[in-house]
Amino acid sequence: MSEVIATNQTILVVGGGISGMTAALEAAECGKQVILVEKNPSIGGRVSQLYKYFPKLCHPKCGLEINLRRIKSNPNLRVMAMTEVTSIEGEAGNYSVSLKTSPRYVNENCTRCGACGDAVEAEFDDEYNYCLSKRKGAYLPFNQAYPERYVLDPRIIGTADADKAKEACKYGAIDTDMQEQETTLTVGAIIWATGWRPYDANRIQPYGYDRFANVITSVEFERMLDPHGPTGGKILRPSDGKEAKDVAFIQCAGSRDRNHLKHCSRICCMASLKQTTYLRELYGDDAKGTVYYIDIRAIDRIDDFYQEVKKDPNISFTKSKVASITEDKETGNPVLHGVDTEGYHRYSNPHELVVLAIGMEPSVPADGFPMEVVLNEEGFVELDEANGAFFAAGCSSDALDVNRAVQSATASALRAIQVVNKVAGAEG
């Protein structure tokens, strides 16, 4: 790795999802020196795992491509993948930040030819596809991955597979002697854009995610619909691989619940409404979607999208917080039990597949921050003077959809720019 140069007029962005990329680009395109660090092998975050955005139902890939082009062409912006922040000391305008970079075992000679991936035999769960499929021990995280290099899974280092990968590479790109590296930087401001993670559905015991194969999460369903995803764009039941045309969508799975996440995750209603359109797109009049909801939180222009979905005769809405799910052993169908609060009648409804609109929580737990920061009750970073020049962007600051996350990132970039401008003025 080449030497990383930073000063107290440099802005550090932690997290390379849509918020981190936005904040880094806004600052860099204003002429500021920016270092963007991402703990995974590539940037893109959860947006890169989406099939479509709501409400326009456009594909995120084009927007991601534009951002990557901007990143590649900006000399003010340096990307450090597979890198985490281990400690932060100092104060606004003068932070000392320690970084740990894990070995990629693939150097910059890589051409993405794929020979190493063809050569190795070991396979592991594919994190990009939420472990719905397997990937090789030498792999490209996804087809738009940046940095544009393969990575070797550390579990094959020291095995015959690593030797095979090295022998297959014609460009000398495989370096199994790479070691973990530590770097210390001086920066003036920090933008914390570490994003969100799906709430653990295993903890919602009545819904049986850990017991019933045909109960999946909304993020898993999203990957299914991607033509490059684990099922090639088909809605396939995990239990038997059959296509599922009768799908139930359960709202607030782990959100607005004192036993789980107290807050509204904001994206869930729109995510489920969007996903009903996937069902219709694939199966037309054979599709049947049922949305079980407490209330639909689709505001402003997004309400138009909700009204369009409501007009669809193949999509129905049941106002109910589902009490529990069992399984029909003969068919493998999940059976939803509860009370329809509009008609006040009990139901036991079988469906071929159930999708849990899973809640959103911060990726970094309250005890996982490298410095002391002010958090709210849900664990999101507050905008507080006590945090100095440590600014949260996107879903580190609140449960937000993509549009609002980008707005938040832009605001954080402006705050960070103001800090380093003051440093420059004081030193000038």
Image (cartoon, rainbow, N blue to C red):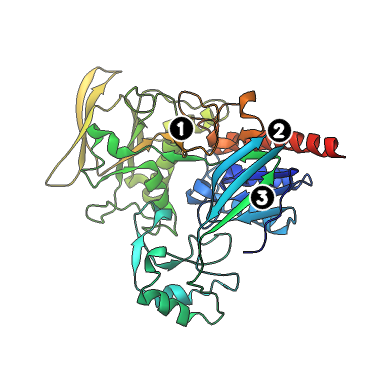
Q: Position of residue 199 (x, y in %)?
A: 38, 37
- On screen, residue 87 above or below 206: below
Query: Which mark is on residue 196?
Result: none
Task: Locate residue 328, reporting x and y percent.
Answer: 14, 41
Is disc 1 surrounded by few (<14), some (14 to 19) or many (20+) residues within 10 Å?
some
Q: Quadrant of the N terminus?
A: bottom right
Q: Position of residue 204 (x, y in %)?
A: 28, 33
Q: Is residue 399 visible?
A: yes
Q: Amino acid at mark 2?
A: Arg
User: Circle 1 sits on which residue?
Assistant: 366
Q: Secondary structure at mark 2?
A: helix
Tally of numbered tags = 3
Q: Residue, x 62% and y 47% (percent of image)?
A: 21
Distance between mark 1 and mark 3 Cα atoms = 24 Å
The residue that mark 3 highlights is: 35
Q: Is residue 211 left or right of residue 247?
A: left
* Residue where numbered disc 2 is placed: 415
Q: Residue drawn 47% across and 77% down?
A: 115
**Left/right of residue 5 with respect to residue 124 in the rendered view:** right
Label 1 to label 2, Cα distance in Å?
Answer: 23 Å
Q: Is disc 3 placed on a helix, strand or loop?
A: strand
Residue 252, compared with residue 223, is above or below; it is above
Quarter of the C terminus within the rendering: top right
x and y, in percent, of residue 9 in the image: 76, 43
